[in-house]
Image (cartoon, rainbow, N blue to C red):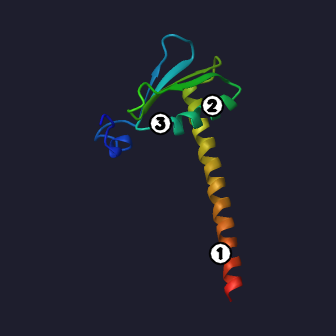
Amino acid sequence: MNAPDRFELFLLPEGASKLTIEPDTKAANAIIVDFEKEDHTLGNLIRAYLLKDPKVLFAAYKIEHPLFAKFKMRIQTIEGYDPKLALKSACNEIVKNLSKIHNNFETEWNLQTLAQEDVYM
């Protein structure tokens, strides 16, 4: 079978970088970010959060081959706004929202656990 071993989809080789950022020579105020060992899950999430920022003019990603867990993302922002800062802001917003989801889940889980304990007492 042509598919790589499952562990190759998420384990970085020793010394490899999770992402690399390089300037986009085809557009002003734009970067290309290569993500290693990631797929549509992260690519689409980051793209969606980038596009919520009114200072981001363009954000898209592509996966060059379905068997390899890596994608390229292109980010272009308005003049005077660093695309790296836009990426960092989007990632911070994602982490903040995931924290809220985690806290809400824990609260509901604890309430459910207490309710079940009351039923069995």
Name which of mark 2 and mark 3 comes first in the sequence. Answer: 3
* Residue identifier under label 3: 39
Query: Residue at 61% of width from left, 36% of height from top?
Result: 90
> Distance from label 2 to label 3 (Cα)?
17 Å
Q: Can see residue 35?
A: no
Q: Which mark is residue 113?
A: 1
> Distance from label 2 to label 1 (Cα)?
38 Å
Name which of mark 2 and mark 1 comes first in the sequence. Answer: 2
Q: Nearer the viewer, mark 2 or mark 1?
A: 1
Rendered location of residue 59, percent (x, y): 59, 24
Q: Are marks 2 and 1 in contact (CB under 8 Å)?
A: no
> Distance from label 3 to label 1 (Cα)?
35 Å
Rendered location of residue 45, percent (x, y): 59, 37
Indicate the amino acid at tag 3.
Asp
- Helix, strand or loop at mark 2: helix
Rendered location of residue 102, percent (x, y): 62, 57
The 10 Å Cα crowd at callout 3, few under 14, some 14 to 19, many 20 or more, is many
- Helix, strand or loop at mark 1: helix
In the image shown, does 84 or 112 lie closer to the viewer? Answer: 112
Q: Is residue 18 left or right of residue 76?
A: left
The 10 Å Cα crowd at callout 1, few under 14, some 14 to 19, many 20 or more, is few
Tell me which corner region of the image, top left, top right, bottom left or bottom right, holds residue 52.
Answer: top right
In the image shown, does 11 or 64 lie closer to the viewer? Answer: 64
* Residue identifier under label 2: 50
Query: Residue at 71% of width from left, 26% of height from top?
Result: 54
Query: Residue at 65% of width from left, 75% of height from top?
Result: 113
In the image shown, does 49 or 121 lie closer to the viewer? Answer: 121
Name the residue furthest bottom.
121
In the image shown, does 55 or 47 lie closer to the viewer? Answer: 47
Query: Residue at 62% of width from left, 53% of height from top?
Result: 99
Indicate the amino acid at tag 1.
Thr
